[in-house]
Amino acid sequence: MKTKHQKILEYIKSLPIGNKISVRQVAKDLKVSEGTAYRAIKESENRGFVSSIERVGTVRIQKKERDNVEKLSYSEIVNIVGGQLIAGRGGIHEIVQDFAIGAMDTEQVSQHIRKGTLLIVGNRPDVISMALEKNCAILVAGGYVPSDDIKKVADSKNLPLIITPHDSFSVAHLINRVTNDQIIKRDIVTVDSIYLPKDHIYTIGINATVEDWYDLQLKVGHTRFPVVNEYGKLVGIVTARDVFLQDRSTSIKDVMERRVTTTELNDPVSSVANTMLLEGFELMPVIDSKNTLLGVVTRKIVINSMLTNNRYQENQHSDTFDEIIRKGIVSRADGLQIKVIPQMLDQFGTFSRSALLSIIDESVHITSYNYNRSEVLMQSVNVYFIRTVPLDRIITTKTMIMDIGRKSAKFDVEVYDKNDLVAKALVTCQVFQRN
């Protein structure tokens, strides 16, 4: 039986794209309290099915796929630039296909825009009118408010007309920063991309018996099963160890493990892998915010994902600190070398401790990969900082494998500035061994 919360979520998903949603209307249509309706609308917003826009309200939008996450909708643009939507509300849910800045004359601007382009422009009514004729949405910078005639054209074509107090450069910077953040998030492998959905796994009910567990085990060959109640919520997990020597008529709820370590769809796979290896778990349930079972991840799936995710793949869009360091490392016969650049400096103008730790981490990964093509996850590190390093110096890391096994490894890392020892570290890692 579905809960009121689930019914409201399904109702919101069934609404047409662009439909306006209000707490009062949802509560009236489904005969629920406004508090229940509000909670469901907020969860829909977290899931990406609706968006709240200032002076417009909450609107049903198309959820973006993970591969298309760097594409922004007009509703997101409004929030990013701190703007207002003054016309064209019917197209607010659409995805921006391209961006252009109207800093040229009208004829040249027309050559750089097309349908789906968001034109960033200032106080230029002629350019705005031309862009609307070419079915382009408009983001007006500098706080300029277009005329009523322009608003009518935007409304008639459902082309969003947005105004913002920021200048064009600031607007472009804000949008570029958010787009880069979205790309970085997309490149993180999450549970959502590897888990086994509920309809592909076997579960056992809380009212089942040990006899039912044995029947299910003989049928599918597994020994670990999530335990769910009549509402599909996770209440425990039962394994062969739990039912061993138990009477066949004993209820599952009397033998199951109630304290279950779980994960959610947006959790990174690296975090799940660390927990599963550390605790020795073979299976981990995946739940939502209401503790409803969505599926499971297994240790085999998690480790395969870690091994097949190419850590060293070039990504021209990524500008994370680790990516900057990774691209700057050069392999030499005597070790790995990297030049100290301004991004690696601390407030005193010398090589920062955080940058040094990132370089040590990268050196350990490369050494392990070259040794037996295994991936490692840093678990603990003891570092001795001996002397500082100024800007533009080239430092060298020398890594020695002290011990490496199937599950853990220890490394000794020395960092040099020419012949001077800069730092020394003892690193302990978890190992993801390739077959």
Image (tube, rainbow, N blue to C red):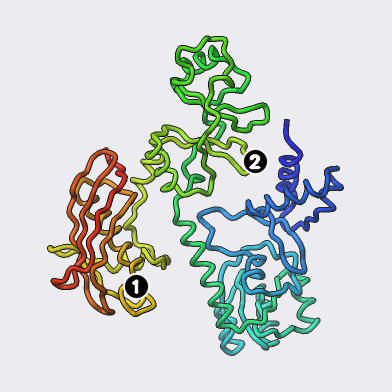
Q: Is residue 221 left or right of residue 402?
A: right
Question: Is label 1 in a helix, a strand or a loop?
Answer: helix
N-terminal label among 2 and 1: 2
x and y, in percent, of residue 296 in the image: 50, 35
Query: From the image, which quarter does the C terminus lie in?
Result: top left
Determine whether 72 is above or below 124 in the image.
above
Question: In the image, which disc is placed on residue 209?
Answer: none
x and y, in percent, of residue 31 in the image: 86, 42
| Amino acid at the residue labelled 1 | Met
Q: Is residue 287 left or right of residue 401?
A: right
Q: Which residue has dot 2 on it?
A: 290
**Picture quarter containing residue 141?**
bottom right
Q: CA distance from mark 2 to mark 1?
A: 42 Å
Q: Residue at x 69, y 59 (%)?
A: 51
In front: 49, or 240? Answer: 240
User: Callout 1: 10 Å neighbours few (<14), some, many (20+)?
Assistant: some
Question: Is label 2 in a helix, a strand or a loop?
Answer: loop
**Picture quarter containing residue 431?**
top left
Q: Is residue 145 left or right of residue 334?
A: right
Query: From the image, which quarter does the N terminus lie in?
Result: top right
Q: Residue at x 44, y 43 (%)?
A: 272
x and y, in percent, of residue 144 in the image: 71, 85
| Amino acid at the residue labelled 2 | Lys
Q: Which residue has dot 1 on it?
A: 344
In front: 328, or 63? Answer: 328
x and y, in percent, of residue 314 in the image: 34, 62
Q: Residue at x 70, y 82 (%)?
A: 129
Determine whether 244 is above or below 67 in the image.
above
**Picture quarter containing residue 208?**
top right
User: Callout 2: 10 Å neighbours few (<14), some, many (20+)?
Assistant: few
